[in-house]
Amino acid sequence: EGSTRSFVCPYHGWTYDLEGKLRAARYLPENVDRSAYGLKRIHVQLVHGMIFINFSDNPSSLSTLQSDLDECLKPYGFERAKVAHREHYPINANWKLMVENYIECYHCAPAHREYSRSHSRQAPEAKAAGLKAAMIARAEAVGLSRKSIDCFGSSSSQSGEQYFYDRYPLYPGYKTGSEDGGPVAPLMGEIKDYDGGAADFQVGPVTYFLAYPDHTVVYRFLPQDIQETDCEVVWLVNENAEEGKDYDIDRLTWLWRVTTEADKAIVDRNQQGVNSRYYEPGPYSQMERFVIQYVEWYLNRLRSEGA
């Protein structure tokens, strides 16, 4: 965030250039090789303006992901979007419980009344088939290609890439994820109008996006300890949108604040239940297929690393 011409360590004042090379260090002996003390390099890759960082010495490539998601993400103009708001929610649970909660909507109807009155994800897909057909019919007219409607993903154990994309319909009367169904910000990127839908997509195991025509919500689930997770939520809007004029923060963030607060409560209690000596895993429901796919990918990755 921001810009600089150099990086200066606040401890001893060593100064590095933008390539990470050590440029200045006071009172070092003449025989010290300064080229050996540059900043550590890590792998960075750009996906439509979003910066993805991997600390592994041998990271998975995002090339297939970029190829598959390119047409889906292009209409939103993420490389030109701006951060409108950011919040952090401390979750007293293991990160995997929070991820599983996010990728299944079996719990939505009983736990999220605000979300469930507008998003068809809260019911089995077959019940929204007619709404999805109407959404698909509007796609090209509003600037979304047919590919941006299709559901697809990858759980390749060979490449290690983990990504997913799906667009689904909102209920009639709702153009976006808001309290009254009305727009909360200017349309994003190249999108020309509302198609009555929203897109879920995932990049990597802990980063998720919910994209509406007028804003996008980003979730990151960052493990802090075995039973502590930082849930970071970021709201993106069109680069030209001005707070107070084009969008109101409370109205923009309302749905996913109340939903995340409810999720924190149920996931915190879920962890307490898992910790109980009486805990026994139950069967998956028909609405938890994304959880099944995720767990299978996760286990395959562990096996491929010899864990």
Image (spheres, helix red, strand yellow):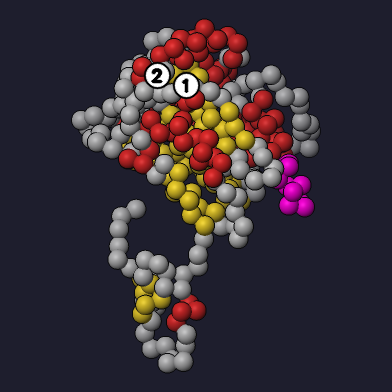
Q: Position of residue 275 (x, y in %)?
A: 72, 39
Disc 1 residue type (three-letter): Arg
Mark 1 packing: few (<14 Cα in 10 Å), some, or many (20+)?
A: some
- Circle 1 — which element? helix
Q: Position of residue 302 (x, y in %)?
A: 73, 47
Asked whether disc 1 touches disc 2, contact meaning CB atoms under 8 Å apart, the reply is yes
Quarter location, residue 59: bottom right
Left or right: residue 183 versus residue 71 is left
Please say if 185 is above or below 140.
below
- The answer to whether residue 262 is visible is no
Left or right: residue 2 versus residue 301 is left
- The answer to whether residue 168 is visible is yes
What's the magenta region? 298-307
| Picture disc at residue 146 | 1
Q: Closer to the camera, 226 or 192?
A: 192
Q: Position of residue 220 (x, y in %)?
A: 50, 41
The prevailing secondary structure element of the residues shown in magenta is: helix
Q: Earlier in the sequence, mark 1 or mark 2?
A: 2
For the point 52% across and 60% down, which residue is it?
42
Q: CA distance from mark 1 to mark 2?
A: 7 Å
Q: Which residue is mark 2?
A: 140
| Picture disc at residue 161 | none
